[in-house]
Image: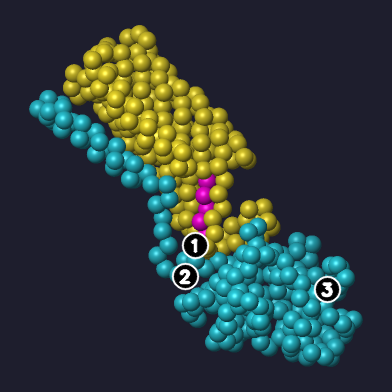
Chain colours: A yellow, B cyan
Amino acid sequence: MKNFMRVFAIALLLAGVGSAKAQAQEGNWFWGLQYMVTTGMSDTKEFVSGGISFRNFAIEGRYATSRNLTLGMYFAWNVFNHETDSTITNFGGTGADVSGFQHRYVNAFPILATAHYYFGRPGGVRAYAGGGVGTYYIENRLDIGRSALVSDNWHLGLAPEVGVIIPVDWNVRAYLNVKYNWALKAGGVEHTFFGFGLGFAWM
Amino acid sequence: MIRKWFATTPGWARAQLLGALAGLGLVLAACYPGEITNVAQTDLVVTVHDSSANFGAIGTYARPDSVVQLLKDSAGSVDLTDEFDSLIIALVDTNMARRGYTLETDPETNGADVILFLAKIGLENSYYVYYPGWCSGWGWWGGWGYPGWGGGCWGWYYPGWVGSGTYEVGTVIMAMMDPEKLETVGDSVRAAMIWTGALSGILAGGATENRVASGVNQAFTQSPYLRATP
């Protein structure tokens, strides 16, 4: 987990450096910072309920290969947490049923290569569709009593996405999107969650 | 409005906004944002049962009239209060009665289908299986001479209730044994444990009647198979 925090911080710094450089290379790069709200589905929902998570953050870079197409990278940090006192049957595969106050966490770190196609004319409001393919590092943690049960896995995954980009300044864009994150089964767990994002991008 | 703000704001101010947004995002996304706010939130109730046991066929149970503290003379063991013993016993009897089981008050004469042991541990334990001699571990046993038990010393073991195998100081254990179901462990023979309820750390600092009652009741609530067939 700590290593990922370092990687995330370094990526954030690089995005800042790239942003300054990109402003000199007008139109080629799109550097975005985004805040999201997410809601879990499937195993994610089962573990941390289906509530809304307000703890999500992403950075990304997109390189325009043509007027309508970008290729890039996407890094995010999605945190789901849930408090419950429900009973867990067959706790950790031990056959024991356990109840008590619990904090449950899912920390997901998508690392995706992305491609997006844009509609409309450059400089105007543009809708886009695309997505990412790559890997998700996901840690599941259950704190109960004075103990913690932790499992972490690398998942292959993909994330289709649609959104809209709105010009704010000559080199600044606001963008809204909906992203479906699908981390394929690893370690017996499959995570899926929807993200609704609002971000700013520097071009 | 956003466009106007960007048009009139210098670059360094925009950079500060960017930094603030990034910082806010990182703070919001803290890995483990939850926290424990009171000691009762650390209470843990664990139950384990033998899935092959026929709990519906049980009609009567016998139990000691005290909650025995195990390993009392072991290094590091803490003396636990007896303040809640009668409450624990009363709650166990109430829950067993609600499930159709009858307390046998004279097992020496009449026998009982199962024995329900009530114990507490004042020692933080890093192992989870323990086989003290039955006679030495349970002073109350004495010469009960329970029919059908064959006499001698029976093995007692702590339930291996979770993978970590750690008991917190002040854990209460309720253990149901079937005297007709024998297991051989090493050189000893003991009655098989068919149900165990453990209330982890509940008699440690800050114990209250509410916490103890909540724990005992929860152990039965999460064991719906404990029910006599009418």
SS at circle 1: loop
- Residue A171, located in which quarter of the rendered image? top left
Mark 1: amino acid: Phe
Residue at which label 3 appears: B190
Q: Can residue A4 be seen?
A: yes
Q: Residue at x 32, y 9 (%)?
A: A67
Please say if the residues under marks 2 and 1 sit with CB atoms less than 8 Å apart. Answer: yes
Residue at which label 2 appears: B40
Does the magenta portion include A143?
yes
| Vertical order, B12 against B42 (above or below) | above
| Vertical order, A89 against B69 (above or below) | above
Q: On what subunit does the disc labeled 3 rest?
A: B
SS at circle 3: strand
SS at circle 2: helix
Q: On what subunit does the disc labeled 1 rest?
A: A
Q: Badge 2: how crowded within 10 Å, few (<14), some, or many (20+)? A: some
Q: Position of residue A74 (x, y in %)?
A: 41, 27
Outermost residue toward the left in this view: B8
Main secondary structure type of the part rendered in magenta? strand
Outermost residue toward the front in this view: B75
Q: Could you tell which of marks 3 and 2 lies nearer the N-terminus?
A: 2
- Quarter that holds the N terminus of chain B: top left
Magenta stretch bounds: A140-144
Q: Residue at x 39, y 25 (%)?
A: A162
Q: Residue at x 38, y 39 (%)?
A: A56
Same-chain status of marks 1 and 3: no
Does the magenta portion include B153?
no
Residue at which label 1 appears: A101
